[in-house]
Image (cartoon, rainbow, N blue to C red):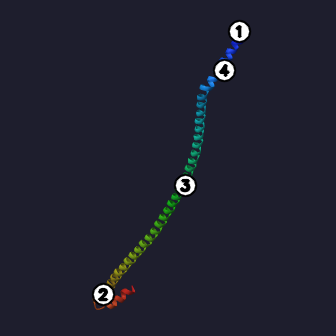
Amino acid sequence: MNPNMTFFGQMLSFAILVWFTMKFIWPPLNAAIEERQKKIAEGLAAAERSQKDLAQAQESVDAALREARTKANEIIDQAHQRANQIIDQAKTDAVVEGTRLKALADAEIAAATDRAREDLRKQVSTLAVTGAEKLLKREIDANAHKALLDELAAEI
């Protein structure tokens, strides 16, 4: 065996192997690598888009939350104002009702006082007539002296 011939055969075998690899194995392998690179690039782009979408969604959620809080505060303020109005109205109504009841009580007291005075005048006039009758030892006609008795009752 000649070492040069062996070396030449090895080189020829290696050249055929390189040609066969370049012709039949390398293109599908290269295509698979490129396809995998495209998928990875698309995945990264999708992840980036998802992050942007997530950031936008978070911003819109934050904006909606701020708006909801603002509206809730407005509703609470309106409720407080309405409660204060109801309390003020109730106070006003209570004062009006108290004034009305006081006026009614004053009117009842005045009427009772007037009735008591009239009753007292009648009793006093009866006592005066009885007293005068005892003093004079004779009967005084109440109907005949009605004007005098009314005048006496008015003075009392």
**Looking at numbered disc 1 in the image, what kind of residue is underneath it?**
Asn
At a point 47% along the width and 64% down the height, the residue shown is 86
Is disc 4 in contact with disc 1, using a CB cutoff of under 8 Å?
A: no
Inter-mark Cα distance, 4 to 2: 169 Å
Inter-mark Cα distance, 2 to 3: 97 Å
> Which is more N-terminal, label 1 or label 3?
1
> Which is more N-terminal, label 3 or label 2?
3
Q: Secondary structure at mark 3?
A: helix
Closer mark to the observer between disc 4 and disc 2: 4
Q: Which residue is mark 3?
A: 67
Q: Is residue 88 left or right of residue 10?
A: left
Instruction: Judge by depth and name the residue closer to the eye, 49 or 90.
Output: 49
**Looking at the rendered structure, which numbered label has been put on residue 123?**
none
Q: Which residue is mark 2?
A: 133
> Which is more N-terminal, label 2 or label 1?
1
Q: Residues within 10 Å of mark 4 (few under 14, many from 20)?
A: few
**Looking at the rendered structure, which numbered label has been put on residue 2?**
1
> Which is more N-terminal, label 2 or label 4?
4
* Quarter-of-image position of residue 18: top right
- Provide residue 152's location: percent of width, then percent of height: 36, 88
Inter-mark Cα distance, 3 to 1: 92 Å
> Which is more N-terminal, label 1 or label 4?
1
Q: Quadrant of the C terminus?
A: bottom left
Inter-mark Cα distance, 3 to 4: 74 Å
**Looking at numbered disc 3 in the image, what kind of residue is underneath it?**
Glu
Closer mark to the observer between disc 3 and disc 4: 4
Inter-mark Cα distance, 1 to 2: 185 Å
